[in-house]
Image (cartoon, helix red, strand yellow):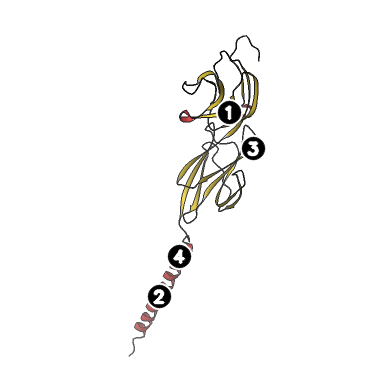
Amino acid sequence: MLDVWGMNTSRIHSWMGFLALIGWLSLLLFWIGCRPLVDEFETTLVVLDAHESPPDSGFVLLVNEIAYNDEGEPHEWNTVGDTLRWTESTGEVVASCNKAESCSWLVCSQDPVSPGRLRTSIVPVSRRDTCFLDMHVPYRILLRLDQVSHSPKAWDIVKLEEFGRQCLLHRVEHPGGYQFRGHIVARSFPLKIDLHQSNGADAPPMTLASTEVSYQGDQTVVMVAWSNTTNTTL
């Protein structure tokens, strides 16, 4: 007499094994399909203005191809993600970047001191970095200089920067009255401006006048009137 029950049980086990195999293969294919095609890593950028606070407006893009104009400013780029915004309180923005691509942060923000100027900065992507945006601060300087002796002299208006560096704004080689206007690139505050008198190659310059300007929003301006004479109205 045939064992029908045993045969049926064997068939059921075979079908269950087959279905389990199909289920396992489906799960494997699903898992392979959901895996990212390339490796990515999380990158963070902190965006700060020259006065070390996050800008009031602007955005960030991840880009991998950039074209520059004759002035060295980016004017075309290929984005690799959505438009990003930094956190209002910290200036932090976080994104995922493809390890296989050479990505950069493109930061765009209006200058709060010179509102008609759009600042753009390119920062190569790393794990974590900080971008400081400069500001263009207008200045007006009035000078009245007198030759107090017959020895040759020159006068320099300089912007003091970090680590003792100096940026020459104007040099005056003859006494008289002068007026200068323009914009100073501010990378930090307070701004420090000096008037130096040069007394020859062998003598260190002498500081005749100095001023500091703190950040005052769109009202930030350098306005000074210097003179090396007495009882003189500028």
Choose between 61 and 225: the one closer to the eye: 225
Which residue carries the number 3 mark?
117
Amino acid tagged 1: Leu
Q: What's under tag 4, amino acid-wise?
A: Ile
Which secondary structure lies at badge 2? helix
Q: Say which amino acid is labelled 3.
A: Arg
Mark number, residue 32: 4
Depth check, front residue: 191 or 147: 147
Where in the figure is residue 134, as x and y percent of width and height? 56, 35
Which of the marked residues, 1 or 2, is nearer the chain's N terminus? Answer: 2
The quadrant of the picture occupied by the N terminus is bottom left
Where residue 137 sits, quadrant-wise, is top right
Assess disc 4: are there few (<14), some (14-19) or many (≥20) residues with their C-alpha within 10 Å of its C-alpha.
few
Question: In this figure, which residue is indicated by the disc labeled 1?
Answer: 169
- Foreground mark, 3 or 2, reads 3
Say which residue appears at 45% left-offset and 65% top-offset.
Answer: 32
Q: Which mark is residue 16?
A: 2
**Mark 3 and 4 residues: CB-CB less than 8 Å, in contact?**
no
The answer to whether 74 appears left or right of 18 in the picture is: right
User: In the picture, which quadrant includes the C terminus?
Assistant: top right
- How far is mark 4 from mark 2, CA to CA? 24 Å
